Image (tube, rainbow, N blue to C red):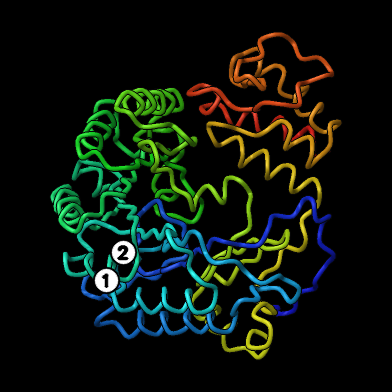
Amino acid sequence: MNSAIAYTPTPPDSLISGVPTAAYLHIPFCRRRCYYCDFPVSVVGDRKNGENSGTIQQYVEMLLQELYTTSATCQLPLCPKSLPLETIFFGGGTPSLLSAGQITSILEALDGQFGIAAGAEISMEMDPGTFTLEQLEGYRTAGVNRVSLGVQAFQDELLGVCGRSHTVSDILEAVEMLRQVDFHNFSIDLISGLPHQNLDLWKASLEAAVAISPAHISSYDLIVEQNTAFNRYYQAGVQPLPGDEMAAEMYRLAQKILTSAGYEHYEISNYAKPGYQCRHNRVYWQNRSYFGFGMGATSYVQGRRITRPRKTWEYYEWLHSEGAKQNGASEIEDAGAESFQDILLETLMLGLRLAEGLSLSGLAEKFGTGTLEKIVTCLQPYHRQGWVEIIDAEGMPVSVPLGQNPPTLGQLRLSDPEGFLFSNTILASLFRQFSS
C-alpha cells in the first residue's frame, strides 16, 4: 500500500465548507453479509457480539485510538479546531452488535476530544434481532437518541432472498422494545425493487411501516452493486428484478402512501414527520464538512475527502504507523483539494436531492451569476417538462421562459415525484454542461 500523500492547495475559502460539527463512526460487524451489500463489513456470525467477541473489542480499541490521536485538530495539519459535535451517526455494518458499554466508551471519547453539544442528534443503526431491551436502555443512557432500524421488507420470503438475518416477527419485537424504552425518534428503512417483489408486496410493506408510525421512513431503490452476491445472481432490470417501469411505479406509490400518511418527502429517498428530519444526513446533502472515523469511513474537511482503508488489517496498519501517530492523516487515501468544478457539481448533485432544493442567491454568491445562468439554461428543457421548478422570492413558481436573466432570489428544486424520479437524467445534463 502506498502510504505517501501530497497536500495540495485548497480551493478559495468561499467554496470550502466550514468547521465540522458532525461525526460518522463506521462499525463494520454483521452477522452475515446481505446479498445487496457492498459496504466494508466484517462477518462475525450469529453468536458473536460486543460482549463475547475479541475481534469486536479489538476494533473498538482501535477506533478509540483513532479518536484520541486525531484529537481536536481533525485529519489535516492545517485544519481548524472543531466545534462541539451537533450530530453523531453510528453506521455499518450493524452497530447494535456492540455492547452499551462500548458505545458509551466511544461517545465519551468523542465528547472528550471534540465536545458534544447539548441537544446533539446521536443516531445508531440497528438490525432487528440483534439487541435486547437491556441493550436499548444502555444505549439510551449512553446518549443515543435516534435509531435507524434496518427493516427492508415486511415479508419473510423477501428478507430471505436478501440474505437478511431477521424475520418479520423480529421486526415487530424490535419496534415494541423501542417503544418500551421510549425511543420515539426512530426510523424504518425499506428497499424497493427487490427480486420477486411486485407492486402488491411493496404496498404491503409501506402500509406496515405506516401502521407502526415511526418518526422517519427511508425508502431506497435497490442498486445492484458490482461486488455483491446480487450482481452474480441477477442482471439489473431483468426478472426476477422489477423492470424500470415497475421501479418507477414503486417510487410513485411510496410517495403517495407516505405523504398521505403525513410524512414530509424532504429528500429523494427520505420521509419524516414534522420536526424529525435526519439532521446528520442533511450535513451530507448540504455539502458541509464532517468527520469520518473507522474502517472505510470518509471525512470531508477543508475541501478534501479523505477515506480510510476498507480492509480491517489495512486500517489497523494505518493506525499503527508512525505517520498516523504524528498527524492523523499520512496514510489514508486523500483525493486532494477539490476544484471549483468539483464543488459546483457536488453542490448540485447533493442539494437537488432535498425537497427545498438550492438557494438561487446562494448559488450566485458561491459560484457567480454567470454560472447560475448556465445552470438555469441547461435545465430549461426539464423546467418546461415539469421536472424542475424555480420558486421566486415570494414562494411562487416561475412558469415563463427564463432566458438569460434567471431570478437570483428563491429556490431551484426538483418536482415531487417526477423530478426526483428522473433526477439521474437531470444531473447527467448538468455534469455534461460543466465537465466539458
- Residue sitting at the far bottom: 322
Q: Quadrant of the C terminus?
A: top right
List x then y, in percent, for residue 319. Answer: 57, 84
Secondary structure under tag 1 reads loop
Using a 10 Å C-alpha cutoff, classify the residue at mark 1 as few (fewer than 14 neighbours), some (14 to 19) or many (20 or more): few
Asked if the residue under mark 1 is in contact with the one under mark 2, i.e. CB atoms within 8 Å, the reply is yes
- Vertical comparison of 89 with 399: above or below: below
- Tell me which corner region of the image, top left, top right, bottom left or bottom right, holds residue 352: top right
Q: Is residue 10 left or right of residue 196?
A: right
Q: Which residue is mark 1?
A: 45
Q: Amino acid at mark 1?
A: Gly
Residue 35 placement, left or right of 89? left
In space, the residues marked 2 and 1 are separated at their CA atoms by 6 Å
Q: Quadrant of residue 12?
A: bottom right
Name of the residue lying farthest toward the front: 118
Q: Is residue 171 left or right of residue 84?
A: left
